[in-house]
Image (cartoon, rainbow, N blue to C red):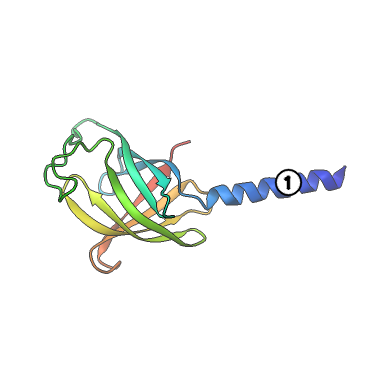
Amino acid sequence: MGKIFIGALLLLGINTATFAADITGLWQTIDDKTGAPKAQVEIRKETNGTYAGKIVKLTPRPGYTPKEICDNCPAPYTNKPILGMDIATGLKQVDGLNYTGGKILDPNTGKVYGLKAKLSSTGKRLHMRGYLGVSALGRNQIWIRVE
């Protein structure tokens, strides 16, 4: 009986570790300048093994009305609705909790940045780094998993 209980706990631990190592799911983006929620992004795994993130909800707040159209964005995003848009593409898992090689679009400015990400060990926070050229020239955002 005790061995079955310990075995069940071990299996539960394996499932938790597997969950923590996966970035798929719904994430609340947080503005790195104000600390306020901006949008919800759904990250999915593509058939080629990379990850992409689509805006599924925009979050207005007092003094901030989200843009609806990506008017300053490069092709193929030009003049497309922001809601439903893939803003993160090409992210690859390199080891455990680390992802790299992606691109992320800032729909407010129309700029496209290189992207790398690190999932917290609990699986509840995603540390995103958008950069131009080299990772040292960029900015960070922390996304929070929506449960």
Q: Residues within 10 Å of mark 1 (few under 14, many from 20)?
A: few
SS label for mark 1: helix
Q: Image check: 24 left or right of 134?
A: right
Q: Residue at x 26, y 35 (%)?
A: 83
Of 51 and 32, the residue lying toward us: 51
Q: Position of residue 102 (x, y in %)?
A: 33, 58
Identify the residue shown where x is 50% and y is 50%. 22
Please state if 17 lies on the left or on the right of 30 as rendered: right
- Classify 140 as above or below 11: below
Residue, x 44% and y 37% (percent of image)? 146
Residue 95 drawn at (x, y percent): 49, 63
The total of numbered circles placed on residues is: 1
Indicate whether 52 appears above or below 97. above
- Identify the residue at image location x=24%, y=58%: 113
Residue closest to the eye, 106 or 33: 106
Question: Horizontal and vertical percent for residue 99?
Answer: 42, 59
Extreme front residue here? 47
Query: Can residue 31 be seen here?
Result: no
Would you say 47 lies left or right of 68 here?
right
Q: Is residue 18 visible?
A: yes
> Which amino acid, by three-letter code, is at mark 1?
Leu
Please determine whether, in this image, residue 63 is positioned above or below residue 141.
Answer: above
Residue in front for this viewpoint, 8 or 92: 92
Residue 45 pos. (x, y %): 43, 48
Q: Which residue is mark 1?
A: 9
